[in-house]
């Protein structure tokens, strides 16, 4: 059983050593533990620090592509290196490294596909009151959208089984946390939380510059992810609301027409008719988007099968490491 701990980094040369030192080197049920650092276009010595501390794998982006892209690059690399379990943690030592043992246990026992570390936002002394409220509201929204029982939706401290990682495809350019949960819920994965400990923040978050920016980007990510996997529901709801709004001025026109005053209210009929047409068009868009979504699901299933084939080929190579690969001679007597 192989565990790879991945750490997305951007200019984390100062904080990375403390994070690396705190990681466990041995866990019951795990045969091999390796560390993977994703250097997301850092301008400092993040990669050099990782090498000095004996990190097994380093993926470096030439430019800063964002946390979501760094996370997906790490997942791809970990899968290629044969990880059975992948743990994601932050480079600023926010999460207690020793609690990785808690994260991986439900995956080892087959209880969960994804395990999210719950920071206990409601009572966490490292969070201010406004941040607690914001986190709880956001988590409640994601819980509803994803149909999972996760109480700390934006926690980046999480363990993922190999099979779950093969089915997750992050498309957001902002953060992976909420989109990953919505995908997991839609794909009926087993997602649970375990309580974990946190350390005090050593610096402000580099993911966003202000609270309004965080709310805007996170909200857009949640809406986009939910609409991607539930397009028919989203567009039908939007279309129905628009149509109902359009029905109001039409009813107003019909009332005045019934009492003989319809000539002065024709604009209500025009506005209402236009809104109803827009509502119907939105519903039709939903039907088309749903068909596109079904096609995307087929593509995701194809990608998943391809990854399983790669696993089988890798397993065969491991089982026959000393096998000689002989080139068949050509008909002219030479080797190709």
Image (cartoon, rainbow, N blue to C red):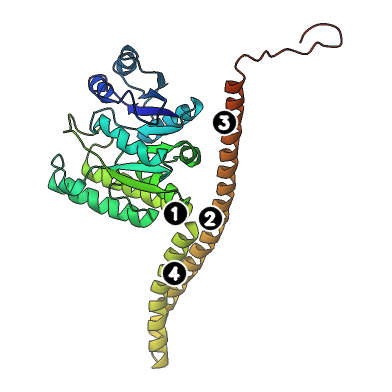
Q: Residues within 10 Å of mark 3 (few under 14, many from 20)?
A: some
Q: Using the image, determine if residue 226 lies above or below residue 5.
A: below
Position of the C terminus, as image quadrant, is top right
Of tags 1 and 4, the one toward the viewer is 1
Please give the name of the residue rendered at 48% of the width and 57% of the height, measured from the top-left corner.
Answer: 231
**Residue 71 appears in which quarter of the rendering?**
top left
Question: Helix, strand or loop at disc 4?
Answer: helix
Read off the residue under disc 1.
Answer: 227
Point out residue 150 in the picture as x, y percentages from the top left corner: 32, 50
| Mark 2 touches mark 1? (CB < 8 Å) | yes
Of tags 3 and 2, the one toward the viewer is 3
Point out residue 137 in the picture as x, y percentages from the top left corner: 25, 53
Does residue 113 appear to the left or right of 287 in the view shown? Answer: left
Please give the name of the residue rendered at 39% of the width and 56% of the height, measured from the top-left corner.
Answer: 147
- Counting residues from the start of the chain, the first of labels 1 and 3 encountered is 1
Point out residue 297 in the picture as x, y percentages from the top left corner: 55, 48
**Residue 206 appears in which quarter of the rendering?**
top left
| Along the viewing direction, whichever of 245 and 289 lies nearer the viewer | 289
Please give the name of the residue rendered at 36% of the width and 27% of the height, measured from the top-left corner.
Answer: 64
Read off the residue under disc 4.
Answer: 240
**Mark 1 → mark 4, Cα distance in angstroms:** 16 Å
**Mark 2 → mark 4, Cα distance in angstroms:** 16 Å
Q: Residues within 10 Å of mark 4 (few under 14, many from 20)?
A: some
Does residue 202 appear to the left or right of 306 in the view shown? Answer: left
| Mark 3 touches mark 4? (CB < 8 Å) | no
**Mark 3 → mark 2, Cα distance in angstroms:** 33 Å
Read off the residue under disc 2.
Answer: 289
- Counting residues from the start of the chain, the first of labels 3 and 2 encountered is 2
Q: Residues within 10 Å of mark 1 (few under 14, many from 20)?
A: some
- Counting residues from the start of the chain, the first of labels 3 and 4 encountered is 4
Q: Using the image, determine if residue 168 lies above or below residue 44.
A: below
Q: Which mark is residue 311?
A: 3
């Amino acid at each position: 059983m192989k565990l790879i701990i991945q750490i997305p980094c951007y200019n984390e040369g100062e904080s990375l050593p403390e994070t690396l030192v705190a990681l466990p080197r041995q866990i019951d049920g795990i045969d091999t533990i390796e560390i993977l650092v994703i250097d997301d276009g850092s301008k400092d010595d993040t990669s050099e620090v990782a090498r000095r501390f004996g990190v097994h794998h380093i993926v470096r982006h030439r430019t800063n592509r964002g946390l979501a892209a760094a996370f997906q690059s790490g997942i791809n690399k970990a899968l290629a290196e044969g990880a059975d379990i992948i743990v994601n943690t932050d480079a600023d030592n926010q999460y207690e490294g020793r609690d990785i043992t808690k994260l991986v246990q439900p995956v080892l026992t087959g209880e969960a596909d994804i395990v999210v570390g719950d920071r206990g936002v409601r009572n966490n002394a490292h969070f201010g009151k406004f941040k607690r409220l914001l986190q709880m509201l956001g988590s409640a929204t994601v819980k509803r959208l994803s149909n999972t029982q996760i109480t700390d939706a934006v926690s980046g401290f999480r363990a993922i089984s190999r099979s779950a990682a093969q089915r997750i495809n992050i498309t957001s350019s902002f953060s992976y946390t909420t989109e990953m949960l919505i995908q997991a819920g839609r794909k009926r994965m087993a997602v649970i939380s375990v309580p974990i400990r946190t350390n005090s923040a050593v610096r402000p978050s580099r993911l966003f510059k202000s609270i309004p920016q965080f709310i805007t980007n996170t909200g857009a990510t949640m809406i986009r992810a939910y609409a991607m996997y539930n397009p028919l529901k989203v567009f039908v709801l939007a279309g129905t609301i628009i149509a109902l709004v359009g029905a109001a001025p039409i009813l107003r026109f019909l009332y005045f027409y019934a009492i003989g005053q319809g000539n002065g209210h024709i604009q209500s009929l025009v506005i209402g008719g236009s809104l109803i047409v827009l509502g119907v068009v939105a519903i039709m868009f939903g039907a088309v988007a749903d068909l596109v979504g079904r096609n995307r699901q087929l593509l995701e299933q194809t990608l998943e099968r391809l990854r399983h084939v790669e696993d089988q080929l890798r397993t065969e190579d491991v089982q026959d490491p000393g096998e000689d690969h002989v080139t068949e001679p050509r008909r002219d007597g030479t080797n190709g």
